[in-house]
Image (cartoon, rainbow, N blue to C red):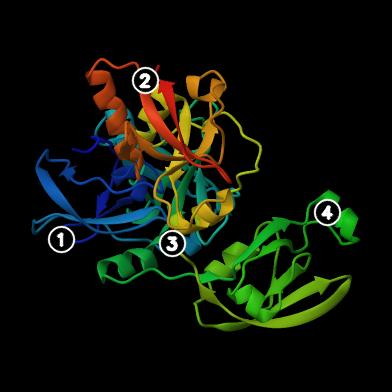
Amino acid sequence: MTQEQQGGGSGFLISADGYIVTNNHVISGGPRGEAVNQVTVTLTNQKEYKATIVGRDVASDLALLKIEAGGLPFVKFADSSTARVGDWVVAIGNPLGLGSTVTAGIISAVQRNIGQGGAYDRYIQTDTAINRGNSGGPLFDLQGNVVGINNMLISPVGANIGVNFAIPADAAIPVINALRAGEKVERGYLGIGIAPVDEDLAAALGLPKDRGEFIQRVEPAQAGEKAGLKRGDVVTKVNGKDVTPQQTLSYIVSNTKPGTRIPLEIIRDGKAMTLNVLVGTRPPEEELAGSNFDPEAEQAEPEDPTGAADKAIQDELGLSVQVVTPDIARAVGVDAGTKGLVIGAASASSDAGRKGLRRGDVILSANRTPVATSEALAKTIADAKKAGRDAVLLEIQRRGQPSAFIAIRVK
């Protein structure tokens, strides 16, 4: 038995034989969640089809579906590189569950960097109304071609305030073509942790601000270390391109083909020098998320969860969790082969928080049943409540200590 998860959003046909583009988060519990087992597509003529997930790409938040049908109307992509600020655009989708809604506006910015890092942090910003349910739908130019794929909004109230974002068609097309061909989407990778050279860091280093990025961490045996990069270096150019807040190091490298040898211009101890690096292949996003887990980071209250299982765990136990990877296991000081869920945050008002559970603790089992996924823990909680129990018995592993059982009350 698995935790049921439902969601909805928009999409659009790109071929007469039923290929459909949408966002990855539309068919999962969030941008990095697992895909749902079953996807139903309802066309504007109200015909329903069971869809097959052809492929999904977490980094770009894109997914490709296929329905078994023929002779279908479909749309074509525009050349989004020609889009300009002030161009009129039209969004079509299913905002808030309302089918086939059309909204219009203008392009507010192109190549917008919103600070998420990676290869796809370049969006078309628009004031066209985009609300929940519009995700994955098309953003049309006035010629009726898809210039972007509606992806997200920024709003303090959770609804449209005119600051909305779409994935540019030119960024989406290579990913969609790769998914359609059954190929893996590969991106460049150096294996370094970086920080922007802001005003304070620039003053400390004696450099102009907003020039280059500072290397905080160099991962062993990765491309950066092999090229000779060190902590404290400042990378100012990659393959002749200036590193700036608008053209970040992550963006340039991610869009470089793995296996390419490129020059890096750096400043080390105040001296300029050039290193040549053989660009590596970026690991899966879930692996990267695990490798960046810092158990010593200041624990905040749990963030709003995206998946149904994560929401149930937060609602009932006051915990945010994620699957333990070998990298996370090493970071929190447990055996690299440990299976379980690491706690990212524990609400201070929860029974778990009051009993001392904290960031970096690993949940090995619940009610004596191993829990290696959020769904497994959520199911155990649901079964306990169904049986009339007010608490669950968690087996907790903490660095340097044997595992211990702690009974945690559910809300």
Percent position (x, y) of residue 70? 8, 59
Residue drawn at 43 percent across, 52 percent down:
338
**Marks 3 and 1, how far apart in space?**
32 Å
Q: Within 10 angstroms of label 1, few (less than 14), some, or many (20 or more) residues?
A: some
The image's mark for residue 284 is: 3
The image's mark for residue 391 is: 2
Q: Within 10 angstroms of label 2, few (less than 14), some, or many (20 or more) residues?
A: some
Q: Could you tell which of marks 2 and 3 lies nearer the N-terminus?
A: 3
Q: Are marks 1 and 4 in contact (CB under 8 Å)?
A: no
Establish if 154 lies above or below 287.
above
Residue drawn at 52 percent across, 31 percent down:
302
Q: Horizontally, is 348 left or right of 54 in the view? A: right
- Quarter of the image where the C terminus is located: top left
Q: Report the front residue among 320 and 196.
A: 320
Q: Nearer the viewer, mark 1 or mark 2?
A: 2
Q: Nearer the viewer, mark 3 or mark 4?
A: 3
Q: Could you tell which of marks 3 and 4 lies nearer the N-terminus?
A: 4
Establish if 244 lies above or below 228.
above
Residue drawn at 65 percent across, 75 percent down:
225
**Marks 2 and 4, how far apart in space?**
49 Å
Q: Could you tell which of marks 1 and 4 lies nearer the N-terminus?
A: 1
Establish if 386 lies above or below 249.
above
Residue located beneath label 1 in the image: 16
Can you name the residue that lies furthest to the front here?
402
**Marks 1 and 2, how far apart in space?**
54 Å
